Amino acid sequence: MTPDILKTIPHRPPFLFLDSIVEHTTDKLIARREIRADEFFFEGHYPGNPIMPGVLMCEAVFQAGAVFLVKKLTADGTSTEALTPILSRIKDARFKQMIKPGDVIDIEVTHSETVQKFHFMTGKVSKQGKTVLTIEYALALV
């Protein structure tokens, strides 16, 4: 994982689900994660047929969103050192494929609007160019 991610959000292994930032613009961020066979969650999530839990796919999206927001606010001149990203809403999560050991996933987040301290975002996880998950959510930095 890149040091840039570690400087941006408080998450740490084994509960950090981003390896690198692939692309970052003013309205979106794409992160990448290689799913390794020795991930802690595979021990108990269908032993013999390991599948990444959907809630952890969502968590990867939320973490990418937090990185995006910290970068956006910092670029706008807002200090984010004392702020913690908190999930405040999940809406319309749709799972279309499974993620298995060895898969490389891209996590794309886009910012749609800000209302007070709430940042409304959309996320998409894909592997080999095919959509795995789509989700709408909101984060607050408190």
Image (tube, grey):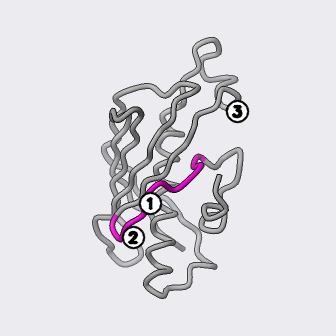
Of the residues tagged 3 and 1, which is closer to the observer?
A: 3
Q: Which residue is mark 3?
A: 40
Q: For mark 3, does the 10 Å Cα neighbourhood hold few (<14), some (14 to 19), or many (20 or more) residues?
A: few
Q: Are marks 1 and 2 in contact (CB under 8 Å)?
A: yes
Determine the residue positioned at 50% across, 63% down: 66
Q: CA distance from mark 1 to mark 2?
A: 8 Å
Of callouts 1 and 2, the N-terminal one: 1
Question: Relative to 44, is 81 above or below?
Answer: below
Quarter of the image for the C terminus: give it.
Answer: bottom right
Q: For mark 2, does the 10 Å Cα neighbourhood hold few (<14), some (14 to 19), or many (20 or more) residues?
A: some
Q: Are marks 2 and 3 in contact (CB under 8 Å)?
A: no
Of callouts 3 and 1, the N-terminal one: 3
Residue 98 pos. (x, y %): 44, 25
Q: Secondary structure at mark 2?
A: strand
Which amino acid, by three-letter code, is at mark 2?
A: Phe
Which amino acid, by three-letter code, is at mark 1?
A: Ser
Q: Which residue is mark 2?
A: 118
Of callouts 2 and 3, the N-terminal one: 3
Q: Which residues are magenta?
A: 17-27
Determine the residue positioned at 66% across, 26% down: 37
Residue 134 pos. (x, y %): 33, 42
Q: Secondary structure at mark 1?
A: strand
Q: Which residue is mark 1?
A: 88
Residue 43 pos. (x, y %): 70, 23
